[in-house]
Each structure stands twice: as structure tokens, then as C-alpha cells.
């Protein structure tokens, strides 16, 4: 049986500026992922330096951080079976312009390597660290999973 997982998604400032908050959230909801945490927050250079530390040597590091501070972001915790992989697949490759996979969020909604609509955790280890970075424990909710039967076979969750 696959595991029920939780993952972090950030709707980036490009998404907020373009009034796409509802549209992007609804893609994840319609897929069958549950929103179990949701808030708007202003990111800081400090938290972004940690979040994007793997890019620290890149020439565009500061530019990416500035772009992520241009407006508040919407942070979400999504839950579902194999949620981390499912969200990455729906999100698509980093460069939504020239590495555009049709049907993915980045493939459908952006023309940019940087302004690519969402951040999504890329592994179980990263998801755990990133959820702690952006959410307090009490901001993520446990509620009954009976409705999972609508989305999965009964031995899938
Ligand atoms: P992902 O967001 O797909 O996990 P990375 O962790 O490699 O990708 O990069 C974090 C973010 O930094 C990307 O989503 C994108 O906004 C930006 N970025 C990464 N590589 C580039 C690049 N070559 N040019 C411009 N922006 C980039």
C-alpha cells in the first residue's frame, strides 16, 4: 500500500500578481489532493536563503529571492497518497517555457524559468523540512479520512 503523505506548495508572487490563486488551488483540489494547511505570508531574505540554499552559488540566487518577496505568497500543505510525487508531476519541470510538458501547471501557465507559478517539495525529506519551515504544527489540520473512499480504492490508503 502507498503512503499518505503531506507536501508543501507555495504559490509564488507571479501567481498572486496574475490573480491565479484560486485557479491553481483548484487544480490540486480537483486532482483529489486535500488542503490541510493554507495561509498567506510575506517571505524574508533570511527564510529564502535557507529555502533556496542549494542555489546559493548560482548567479540568479538573489534575483530568485527578490522575486519570491515581491508580494506575499500562499503556502499550502497538501495531503494524499504519494502526494509529494503527485504534486511534482502535476507541477512539471522547473523551466515551464522551453521544457514545457503539456498539461502540467508550469507547462500551461508560464513562460519563464524563474516565474514558474509554484514551488513544490521534491522528496519526503524535503517536504518534512519545508513544512516545518513554513507552518507551525497547529496550522496543519488532521481531519477524518472517510472521504478518501471517494478518491481511492479501499486498499490504496
Ligand atoms: P524547482 O522549483 O523546480 O524545485 P530548483 O529548486 O532548482 O527548482 O530552483 C528553485 C527556483 O529557482 C525555481 O523554481 C525557479 O524559480 C528558480 N530557478 C532555478 N533555476 C533557474 C534558472 N536557471 N534561471 C532562473 N531561475 C531559476
Image: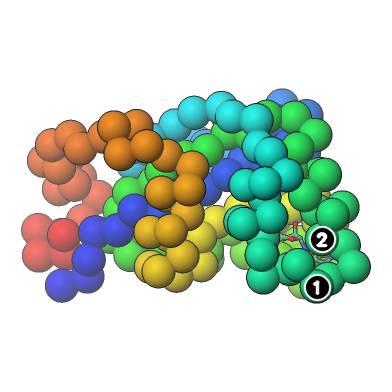
Tell which of 37 and 128 is nearer to you: 128
Is the CB of mark 1 within 8 Å of ligand 1? no
For the N terminus, give its image quadrant: bottom left
Q: Is residue 151 left or right of residue 91?
A: left
Residue 28 at x, y percent in the picture: 47, 45
Q: Residues within 10 Å of mark 2 (few under 14, many from 20)?
A: some
Task: Residue lying at the far front in this picture: please name it.
Answer: 46
Do tag 2 and tag 1 residues touch (Cβ < 8 Å)? yes
Residue 79 at x, y percent in the picture: 32, 49
Residue 6 at x, y percent in the picture: 34, 53
Q: Is residue 12 left or right of residue 151?
A: right
Q: Is residue 148 above or below residue 25?
A: below
Tell which of 53 and 105 is nearer to you: 53
Residue at x 45% of width, y 70% of height: 123
Q: Is residue 20 above or below residue 146?
A: above
Quadrant of residue 106 within the rendered picture: bottom right
Q: Is residue 147 left or right of residue 110?
A: left
Quadrant of residue 70 within the rendered picture: top right
Q: Estimate the spatial distance between the alpha carbons at disc 2 and disc 1, rounded to whole Å.
A: 7 Å
Q: Quadrant of ligand 1?
A: bottom right
Residue at x 44% of width, y 31% of height: 38
Residue 29: in sight, yes or no?
Answer: no
Q: Residues within 10 Å of mark 1 (few under 14, many from 20)?
A: few
Give the labeled residue for mark 1: 57
Q: Secondary structure at mark 2?
A: helix
For the C terminus, give its image quadrant: bottom left
Residue at x 87% of width, y 52% of height: 63
- Specify the label residue 61 is tagged with: 2
Amino acid at each position: 500500500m502507498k503512503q499518505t503523505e503531506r507536501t508543501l506548495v507555495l504559490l509564488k508572487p507571479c501567481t498572486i500578481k496574475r490573480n491565479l490563486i484560486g485557479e491553481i488551488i483548484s487544480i490540486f483540489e480537483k486532482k483529489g489532493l486535500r488542503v490541510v494547511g493554507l495561509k498567506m505570508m510575506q517571505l524574508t531574505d533570511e527564510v529564502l536563503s535557507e529555502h533556496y540554499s542549494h542555489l546559493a552559488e548560482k548567479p540568479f540566487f538573489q534575483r530568485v529571492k527578490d522575486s519570491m518577496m515581491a508580494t506575499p505568497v500562499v503556502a499550502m500543505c497538501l495531503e494524499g497518497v504519494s502526494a509529494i510525487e503527485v504534486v511534482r508531476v502535476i507541477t512539471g519541470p522547473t523551466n515551464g517555457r522551453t521544457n514545457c510538458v503539456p498539461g502540467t501547471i508550469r507547462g500551461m501557465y508560464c513562460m519563464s524559468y524563474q516565474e514558474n507559478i509554484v514551488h513544490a517539495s521534491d522528496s519526503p525529506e524535503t517536504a518534512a523540512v519545508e513544512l516545518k519551515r513554513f507552518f507551525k504544527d497547529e496550522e496543519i489540520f488532521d481531519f477524518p479520512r472517510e472521504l478518501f473512499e471517494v478518491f481511492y480504492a479501499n486498499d490504496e490508503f
